[in-house]
Amino acid sequence: VQLVESGGGSVQTGGSLRLSCTASGYRHSSGVCAGWFRQAPGKGRERVASIRDGGTTTNYASSVRGRFTISRDSAKNTVYLQMNSLKPEDTATYYCAAGWVGYPARPVTDFLDSSGYQYWGRGTQVTVS
């Protein structure tokens, strides 16, 4: 299983970026919860957003709700994070993660922190100035 992030870069305050996470070795499906996390220098890893249940269930950190949107394209086996109205405090390395929902399905709360995910990408840098 491999997750590869792309789309990071440098942007000015108020700008937008779209991150992509393409998976190989498994399918982004209803059996998988995909998430985006971020980690700023000297800080812990923070969950940003997650998507599961075939894309019908999404969850956002309060710090990004209303500005970021997580989505998935099953045909491309890719999960996206559209980031609008970016702020300097959004500067971090962003990581894509995936975890098995299982049967019976694990609750949404299982995926609110990094321990719920089995697979991780290497990250992509986002810098907002």
Image (cartoon, rainbow, N blue to C red):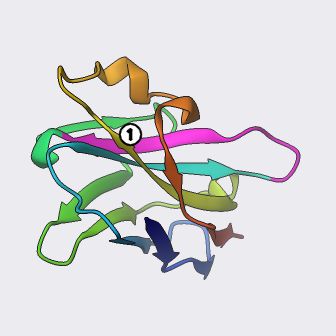
The residue under label 1 is which amino acid type? Arg
Relative side of 29 to 86, left or right: left
94 or 90: nearer the viewer: 94
Q: Position of residue 58 (x, y in %)?
A: 25, 39
The answer to whether residue 106 is magenta is: no
The answer to whether residue 48 is magenta is: yes
Where 27 falls versus 69 (above or below)? below
Quick check: can you spot residue 64?
A: no
Q: Say which element carries label 1.
A: loop
Say few, some or many: other residues with alpha carbon within 10 Å of mark 1 (under 14 / 14 to 19 / 20 or more).
Answer: few
Q: Position of residue 123 (x, y in %)?
A: 62, 67
Q: Please report the residue visible at 62 percent of the width from the left and 51 percent of the height from the top.
A: 38
Q: Which residues are magenta?
A: 41-52
115 or 84: nearer the viewer: 115
Where the N terminus falls, by quadrant? bottom left
Q: Quadrant of residue 90?
A: bottom right
Q: Position of residue 114 (x, y in %)?
A: 56, 36
Q: Please report the residue visible at 32 percent of the width from the left and 34 percent of the height from the top.
A: 59
Residue pointed to by mark 1? 65
Where 93 falls versus 57 (above or below)? below
All told, the count of numbered labels is 1
Where 96 falls versus 103 (above or below)? below
63 or 27: nearer the viewer: 27
Relative side of 35 to 76, left or right: right
Q: Please report the residue visible at 20 percent of the width from the left and 24 percent of the height from the top.
A: 105
31 or 64: nearer the viewer: 31
Quick check: can you spot residue 100?
A: yes
Q: Please report the residue visible at 18 percent of the width from the left and 26 percent of the height from the top.
A: 103
Q: Position of residue 39 (x, y in %)?
A: 70, 50
Where the C terminus falls, by quadrant? bottom right
Relative side of 46 to 78, left or right: right
